[in-house]
């Protein structure tokens, strides 16, 4: 019998909770009921799996157990009739707890959940936060860190968002074809942030393939939307390098030091092919341009052979359509490779990104390259104090010690 410890159950929670919550929302039409039942099911798993062993289908076990818990709770509270009425609004066609018929253009509960969470009645921040919580299985604390907010503040916002879905009777479905273009930007933002949550946190790495899976579903749903294809290409090209980002000891490896022989050529070729198709359409968007930048990086056999002039030209286009401080920061990095660290630092110093740790890390690196070591050490420490992972904190503190 395989050993099942708490860490294994937590890993399965990351991988399966979004699927289970989404399935139960469709059955019961109530987010709180679904979320609480899944939490209870995992508590049961923590108690029973170490002794009984891992079931053949852990996700199915969780969903089935959670469903039974939800039914017991509803019967106990005598709320079946009330919630069935709500379920009729959230999920038309569900005439009892057992109905699991698919509806809409895409047969996937989690995609329905994304569109529910990304409804225009909710703020953009609430859309992203709620989807990360419900779909990705991130804790409230982890979602709060993604937004640089205190955990109690994020907890209140999540509660308000769920109440808004219920009060506004937001339907649990994929929108009709004519509604999709207006709803798409929020959904793409959610999928991208889900991927990045997996990229930056070891505990959430299962979110990376989940985000790619959802992006593939979106390309099936909207094959003529170039930004959907652009997002998929961006995720594939980023994913191609993921295994080379960390050393066996858990330390971070920067792009210039990565073993490019470990990059996944299959993902690179697929991503670059999508970028070429996007370029032929000639309707550039932010995700397409970010994918094109990553495609240029993937073309270079070594860091020194990177075509930084082309990358800078792409960042110029990106900054024109998405004039955000973060894009400007990334463009400044490219300027540093083309025009030198002094030119880049002048651009960086103009940005208002004091609460963004890559800003301080970039500034530290540029100061180090200019020989301003004492200033670099301070900037490295500032970046390290804000970094979200142990690997990043240790990397930045090493940089600070080297600069002293």
Image: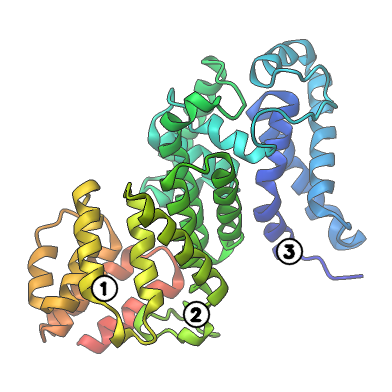
Give the mark toward the camera: 3 or 1.
Answer: 3
- Residues marked 2 and 3 touching at CB (< 8 Å): no
| Mark number, residue 244 | 2
Helix, strand or loop status at disc 2: helix
Side (left or right) of 350 relative to 207? left
User: In the picture shown, does residue 32 fall above or below 62?
Assistant: above
Q: How is the image coloured?
A: rainbow
User: In what quadrant of the picture does the N terminus appear?
Assistant: bottom right
The structure residue drawn at horizontal position 64% and vertical position 40%, both measured from the top left corner, is 110
Q: Earlier in the sequence, mark 2 or mark 3?
A: 3
Res. 323 in view: no
Side (left or right) of 382 relative to 395? left
Of residues 209 and 31, the one drawn nearer to the viewer in this rendering: 209
Q: Quadrant of residue 289?
A: bottom left
The spot of residue 39 in percent (x, y) is 70, 42
Q: Residues within 10 Å of mark 3 (few under 14, many from 20)?
A: some
| Mark number, residue 381 | 1
Q: Quadrant of residue 8?
A: bottom right
Of residues 304 and 62, the one drawn nearer to the viewer in this rendering: 304
The spot of residue 44 in percent (x, y) is 81, 47
The structure residue drawn at horizontal position 77% and vertical position 65%, both measured from the top left corner, is 5
The structure residue drawn at horizontal position 82% and vertical position 24%, both measured from the top left corner, is 97
Give the mark toward the camera: 1 or 2.
Answer: 2
Q: Earlier in the sequence, mark 3 or mark 1?
A: 3
- Residues marked 1 and 2 touching at CB (< 8 Å): no
Q: CA distance from mark 2 to mark 3?
A: 24 Å
Q: Earlier in the sequence, mark 1 or mark 2?
A: 2
Where is mark 3, residue-wise?
Answer: 8
The structure residue drawn at horizontal position 45% and vertical position 36%, both measured from the top left corner, is 184
Res. 276 in view: yes
The spot of residue 162 in percent (x, y) is 54, 27
């Amino acid at each position: 019998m395989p050993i099942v410890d708490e860490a294994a159950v937590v890993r399965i929670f990351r991988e399966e909770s979004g699927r289970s919550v989404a399935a139960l929302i469709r059955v019961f039409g109530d987010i709180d009921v679904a979320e609480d039942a899944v939490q209870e099911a995992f508590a049961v798993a923590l108690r029973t799996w170490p002794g009984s062993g891992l079931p053949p289908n852990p996700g199915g076990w969780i969903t089935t157990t959670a469903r039974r818990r939800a039914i017991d709770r509803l019967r106990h509270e005598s709320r079946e009739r009330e919630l069935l009425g709500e379920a009729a609004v959230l999920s038309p066609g569900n005439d009892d707890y057992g109905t699991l018929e698919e509806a809409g253009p895409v047969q996937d509960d989690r995609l329905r959940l994304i569109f529910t969470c990304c409804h225009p009645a909710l703020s953009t921040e609430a859309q992203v936060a709620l989807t990360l919580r419900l779909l990705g299985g991130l804790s409230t604390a982890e979602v709060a860190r993604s937004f640089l907010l205190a955990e109690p503040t994020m907890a209140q916002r999540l509660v308000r968002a769920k109440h808004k879905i219920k009060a506004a009777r937001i339907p649990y479905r994929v929108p009709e074809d004519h509604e999709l273009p207006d709803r798409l930007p929020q959904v793409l933002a959610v999928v991208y942030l889900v991927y990045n949550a997996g990229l930056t946190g070891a505990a959430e790495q299962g979110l990376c393939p989940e985000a790619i899976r959802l992006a593939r579903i979106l390309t099936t749903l909207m094959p003529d939307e170039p930004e959907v294809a652009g997002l998929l290409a961006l995720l594939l090209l980023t994913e191609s390098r993921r295994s080379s980002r960390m050393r066996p000891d858990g330390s971070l490896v920067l792009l210039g030091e990565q073993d490019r022989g470990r990059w996944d050529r299959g993902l690179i070729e697929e991503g670059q092919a999508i970028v070429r198709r996007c370029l032929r359409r000639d309707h550039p968007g932010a995700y397409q341009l970010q994918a094109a930048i990553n495609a240029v990086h993937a073309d270079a056999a070594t860091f020194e052979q990177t075509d930084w002039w082309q990358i800078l030209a792409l960042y110029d286009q990106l900054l024109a359509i998405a004039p955000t401080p973060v894009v400007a920061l990334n463009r400044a990095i490219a300027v540093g490779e083309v025009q030198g660290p002094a030119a880049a630092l002048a651009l960086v110093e103009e940005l208002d990104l004091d609460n963004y740790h890559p800003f301080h890390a970039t500034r530290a690196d540029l100061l180090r390259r200019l020989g301003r070591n004492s200033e670099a050490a301070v900037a490295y420490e500032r970046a390290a104090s804000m970094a979200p992972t142990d690997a990043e904190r240790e990397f930045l503190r090493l940089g600070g010690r080297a600069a002293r």
